Image: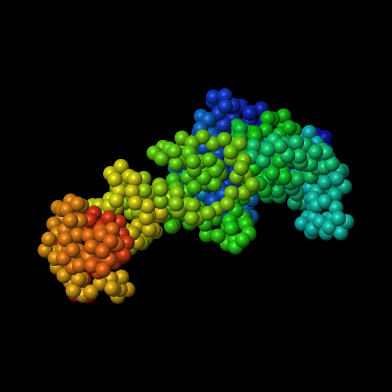
């Protein structure tokens, strides 16, 4: 064995697969010509960020609108930053969002798909086989620099105003003699593997980013770490091997990787592979006072996808909101295609590009999209989602909804046609208790609520309620009901319409709406509510009369 082979024995296990056998194990996918293969590649370093869902949604749509494949890959090679359980949570969240995920890990820990394993820590052999290949070609080398030495180097670079990094004359281990390398390995000195770059920082390459367009970047001259001392590769190296063998065609990823693109392209070229197309988007922004900043894991609850589950935004509303952020034309399309699933909308890179500089997060917009989504749902579906939410968040309202399910569904049917298209007062499932709780017992009126009726005399209050109880039937049509209320109004000196009041102001104390308000406040505790006749019908005679009588005692 020559010395290079003796070093290789120390660096690599003897049973690594050959590159050819790996190529054979992951054959080209058989797909239509323009089909895209995309992925989302989260690192399990904490909760799932809204930006992760954003990238997943865009990638999933691009794949499926083109007849391609979308998969999840867990990038867990940074063991120092890994958070226990985070991978499982992210997989569950992504799958729960009803994105169609063709391949990847399942919440159970199993996985589906022929291009796995889909978790990087299980693919060490593949990475090692390629690092060995680079080593054999003289394009990778072990580096024994300690943290202290690297710190020292950085300080010196700062002092000399040199560019930071491990390159050129700074790359100390690059030209170590083979004898020395063998000696260090034999004495078990810890090492990392570095890529030996032939790039020239003063030369430019032009990249055609899918979202940023054409840009010039310097060639990479950094001998970056491709394998850490724990034997696991860095992101730069791992993603490239995986995206090649998983046959990814398009990568949509965060801006923070844009500056590493020359390195990634350099490595693809070195292996003789066609790189996928890359698109980089800036982090989602948020207004903070008058300036913009990144939506931050640390400061903003809304950065965590879990926030939307806890508050109870329908998942589809969150997805539609993200599409809206990504592509400003989506809103117009949505208005023109109200009954169509968002999956019918076709995303195009040209349009996505407009938001690539940093979409601006806006909770008010999300609320409005969510209200539209819920307004389009049937009462039964609203009920089911609200119960699921109330159960998951263990709110006491879950019991109320479950124990009186038919009544709850009827209460949600008020101002909601059978096929959806209804009231827009509910933006999230946590609004449901607030919006329908008055239908349920115990119902008590506070002094503040009773104050809503101030200005109406006791005679009118008592007389109207008594008259209403005498005449109201819960079979009354809305017209009949209103006729009766107008009669009551007239009896007590109130005009039967606002117009009438305006023309003969001096003759009246008010108009019919003031009388309706008496019943509204006593039945719902509010000055405003959905259609009162419909509410009464759902409540039924007995409850309506009981509440009005209790109200009488309080007035
Ligand atoms: N694991 C990387 C991250 O979380 C993924 C980047 C990519 O999509 O390639 O930032």
Quarter of the image that includes the C terminus:
bottom left
**Which of the two residues, 14 or 279, is positioned nearer the viewer here?**
279
**Which of the two residues, 167 or 147, is positioned nearer the viewer here?**
167
Here the colouring is rainbow
461 is higher (above) or lower (below) than 540: below
Residue 268, image x, y percentages: 71, 34
Residue 201 sits in quarter: top right
How many labels sit on residues? 0
Residue 249, image x, y percentages: 61, 32
Determine if residue 442 is in view. Answer: no
On screen, residue 479 versus residue 454, left or right, reads: left
239 is higher (above) or lower (below) than 31: below
**Which of the two residues, 520 or 431, is positioned nearer the viewer here?**
520
Residue 411 sits in quarter: bottom left
Residue 365, image x, y percentages: 49, 52
Residue at image position (33%, 48%) is 422
In the orientation shown, which residue stands out farthest toward the left?
A: 470
Residue at image position (38%, 58%) is 431
Residue at image position (20%, 67%) is 493
Residue 502, image x, y percentages: 29, 62
Quarter of the image that includes the N terminus:
top right
Residue at image position (59%, 30%) is 26
Determine if residue 230 is in view. Answer: yes
């Amino acid at each position: 064995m020559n010395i290079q082979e003796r070093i290789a024995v120390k660096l690599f296990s003897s049973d690594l697969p050959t590159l050819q056998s790996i190529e054979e194990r992951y054959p080209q996918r058989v797909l239509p010509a323009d089909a895209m293969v995309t992925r989302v590649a989260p690192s399990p370093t904490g909760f799932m960020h809204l930006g992760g869902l954003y990238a997943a949604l865009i990638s999933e749509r691009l794949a499926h609108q083109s007849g391609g494949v979308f998969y999840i890959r867990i990038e867990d090679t940074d063991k120092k930053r890994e958070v226990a359980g985070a991978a499982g949570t992210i997989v569950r969240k992504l799958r729960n969002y009803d994105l169609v995920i063709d391949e990847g890990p399942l919440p159970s820990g199993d996985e589906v798909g022929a291009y796995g394993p889909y978790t990087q820590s299980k693919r060490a052999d593949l990475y090692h086989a390629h690092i060995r290949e680079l080593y054999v070609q003289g394009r990778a080398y072990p580096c024994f620099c300690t943290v202290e030495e690297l710190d020292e180097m950085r300080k010196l670079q700062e002092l000399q105003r040199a560019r930071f990094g491990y390159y050129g004359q700074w790359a100390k281990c690059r030209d170590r003699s083979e004898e020395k390398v063998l000696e260090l390995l034999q004495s078990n000195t810890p090492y990392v593997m570095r890529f030996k770059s032939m790039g020239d920082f003063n030369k430019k390459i032009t990249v055609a980013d899918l979202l940023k367009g054409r840009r010039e970047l310097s060639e990479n001259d950094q001998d970056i770490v491709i394998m850490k001392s724990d034997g696991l590769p860095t992101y730069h190296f791992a993603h490239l091997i995986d995206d090649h063998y998983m046959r990814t065609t398009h990568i949509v990823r965060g801006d923070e990787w844009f500056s590493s693109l020359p390195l990634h392209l350099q490595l693809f070229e070195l292996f003789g592979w066609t790189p996928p197309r890359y698109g980089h988007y800036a982090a989602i922004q948020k207004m903070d006072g008058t300036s913009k900043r990144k939506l931050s894991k640390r400061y903003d609850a809304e950065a965590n996808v879990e926030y939307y589950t806890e508050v109870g935004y329908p998942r589809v509303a969150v997805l539609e909101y993200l599409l809206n952020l990504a592509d400003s034309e989506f809103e117009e399309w949505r208005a023109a295609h109200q009954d169509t699933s968002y999956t019918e909308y076709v995303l195009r890179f040209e349009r996505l590009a407009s938001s690539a500089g940093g979409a601006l997060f806006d909770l008010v917009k999300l609320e409005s999209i969510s209200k539209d989504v819920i307004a389009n749902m049937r009462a039964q579906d609203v009920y089911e989602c609200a119960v699921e939410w109330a159960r998951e968040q263990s709110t006491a309202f879950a019991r109320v909804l479950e124990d009186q399910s038919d009544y709850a569904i009827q209460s949600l049917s008020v101002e909601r046609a059978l096929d959806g298209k209804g009231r827009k007062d509910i933006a999230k499932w946590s609004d449901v208790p607030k919006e329908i709780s008055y239908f349920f017992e115990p119902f008590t009126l506070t002094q503040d609520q009773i104050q809503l009726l101030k200005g109406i005399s006791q005679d009118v209050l008592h007389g109207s309620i008594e008259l209403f109880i005498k005449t109201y039937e819960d079979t009354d049509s809305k017209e009949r009901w209103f006729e009766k209320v107008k009669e009551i109004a007239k009896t007590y000196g109130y005009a039967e319409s606002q117009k009438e009041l305006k023309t003969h102001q001096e003759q009246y104390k008010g108009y019919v709406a003031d009388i309706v308000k008496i019943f509204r406040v006593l039945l719902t505790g509010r000055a405003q509510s959905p259609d009162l006749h419909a509410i009464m019908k759902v409540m039924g005679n007995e409850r309506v009369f009981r509440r009005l009588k209790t109200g009488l005692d309080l007035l």
